[in-house]
Image (cartoon, coloured by chain):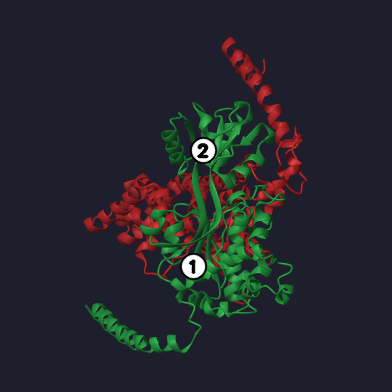
Chain colours: A red, B green
Amino acid sequence: MHPLLRALFGTKLNAALTLLMLATFAWALPPLFRWLLSDAVWQAENRTACTAAGTGACWAFIRARFALFFYGLYPVPERWRADLGLLLLAVVGAGALFARRGRGWWLAALVTLVPLAGGILLAGGILGLKPVPTPQWGGLLLNVVISFVAMAGAIPLGILLAFGRRSAYPVIRWISVAMIEFWRGVPLLTILFMGLILLPLFLPQGVTVDNLVRALIVMTLFNAAYMAETIRGGLQGVPRGQAEAAAALGLHPAQVQLLIVLPQALRLSIPGIVNIAVDLFKDTTLVSIVGLFDLMGVVNQSMKDPAWLGLAAEGYTFAAIVFFFACLVISLGGSLLERRFAVAHRR
Amino acid sequence: MQTLKDLLRRGALAAIAGGIAALFAGNVALAQLAPPPGPTVEAIKRRGTLNCGIDTGVPGFAAQDASGTWKGIDIDYCRALAVAILGDASKSKYTPTTAAARFTVLQSGEIDVLIRDSTLTFTRSTALGLDQVAVNFYAGQGFLVRKALGVSKAADLQGATICTVTGATLELNIADFARSTGARIGTLLFDKAEEAIAAMEAGRCDGYTDDSGSLAGMRSTLKVPADWMVLPELISKEPLGIHIRSGDPRWQKIVFWLDTMLKSAEEFGVTQANADQMKSSKDPFVLRLIGVEGDFGKMLGLDNDFFLRAVKTVGNYGEMYDRHFGPNALDLPRGLNNLWNKGGMHYTLPLR
């Protein structure tokens, strides 16, 4: 008997469970398939063509608003700038993952060149680029921008907080503990609402802080707290002998931490960091609640267009698919990183 | 300490400057008939854009079409204001605001005006320190129910379960209504209207309640709209309108009279298409409306053509309603939103 068959039908209980599952699939999958694909409407001017009896999903709705889902209100003639920015991020990100040599340079580019060039490209206003104010940024572009900035800010800040929490100086230790516990102890949504509603009341009349900037600061600080705890776990996982050996070789305490302990700690923290990155990417959808139009915001908004009213199922299905694949890319990148470092470890 | 001293010195300087300005102001006001348009309009002109607070998305009032352009009756009001003040409707900048943040955003000065299907109420006027300038849409809470239920008025809903969304006053209104009529009406709460509608179609409740403006849109999204009916009566008054910050009476007058004129234009037959030809009209009201006579624009601190520009951009109130709620759009009968002489509520103040 084939091992697979034995696993499925080996015992009476297993056989019964297998048959039950098959029956469930047979019952649930065909209607899902019909709705998703065979009965779906791909071409339509508006929702009237989708409301005929027996029609499935109205993908024409997604097609009509496809560009909006990715760019939001970013002006059409300027969208190449967003494309170029994302391409730059993808190339440098891939470089940092795959490069055999000079990985340090790729990483340096990722945290300096990409934010700088990306910021110039997206915001414009210099080098002859037309300025695009942040309320016009939207769609998946906004999710990527927020996750990247928050991640790029949270890692260094998290490292500082992690060291701070292990510091021998009580003042530094307590400040770090207070920061970490405050940001971990308050729900992200609460902080976003506070930034949106309370902040304007404290600022003098007429002084406003960009909505996106508020969201970026909140997301960065919030994730820095989680990052700090993940990295602290990594620091604890580095054998004490490493630091002692380095000290015995005559390295300065700062050199011991930066050159010996931190690199090993970061390698140990990779799964945790990737976990935070995936969480963060999904959490960016919360900004739709404070009036920013990320992918979820645009999906919610699109259902209110009188021409496409009430197509919630299609909108949410589409968003789920996009988010699934985006998170898959992050996870795959993370596991690749993990494997490559593990190889170095075994040597 | 240094900064405190600085502040005091600056305060003293400002007080002196203010005193001098006040001395002259009396003379100036007497000397010229056209007053300045007030700080809000001055700020708008300096900035070059009108900051308009709108909804994040509600059919007919504010929603983005497939090209990302905002459309809706609230949007048309923003455009009318922008073209009246700045001469260019595209200078209207939209800030989508959530229900929780809308009034804070207005108070903080991020927006000049809030046109966001918001009900004008006592507490919003007093406790929040806002001016409620005009009603641009008379709505009320209504019911969408299954026809098979066999009810013809809301009081018949005894024992029924109604789906609705949390957070708004909808649930409170049902409770008040049930208390006043003695009917027992159960509610089933959802976070989003789409969920509530889905639950209703699945038979978890007998109907759905929301603002009358939204109900029409919702009914058209149902699988079999003919199985459902909107009950004729409304259980609450929801006059939706325009909010501004208190403290700038000139701005208040401009917004108020622009709204009045948009409705008057319908009454006097001035439309987007015929506005220019109307200059040869014999009706003094029409001539004042489009700025041929009477210097009304100047008296508001604008120019006399301001309304002509507005009506040529967005049309009169009736045209706006038809565009977003008419038979080719959400198909919501005019009802209370008709002119007073056609059975509605819009009875505008006379232009004289």
Residue A249 placement (x, y as % from top left): 32, 58
Q: How many marks?
A: 2
Instruction: Looking at the image, tell me whether mark 1 or mark 2 is earlier in sequence order.
Output: 1
In the picture, measured across the screen, residue B129 lies left or right of residue B174, that is: left
- Mark 2, residue position: B164
Residue A21 can be seen, yes or no = yes
Residue B46 placement (x, y as % from top left): 51, 79
Which residue is drawn at the image coordinates 48% and 87% (left, top)? B32
Name the image quarter holding residue A332: top right
Q: Nearer the viewer, residue A129 or B177?
A: B177
Vertical side of B162 occupied by A287: above or below: below
User: Is the C terminus of chain B in the top left, top right, bottom left or bottom right quadrant?
Assistant: bottom right
Q: Amino acid at mark 1?
A: Asp
- Mark 1, residue position: B112
Residue A250 can be seen, yes or no = no
Task: Give neighbour class at mark 1: few <14, some 14-19, many 20+ (Cα, 10 Å).
Answer: many
Task: Give neighbour class at mark 2: few <14, some 14-19, many 20+ (Cα, 10 Å).
Answer: many
Q: Amino acid at mark 2?
A: Thr
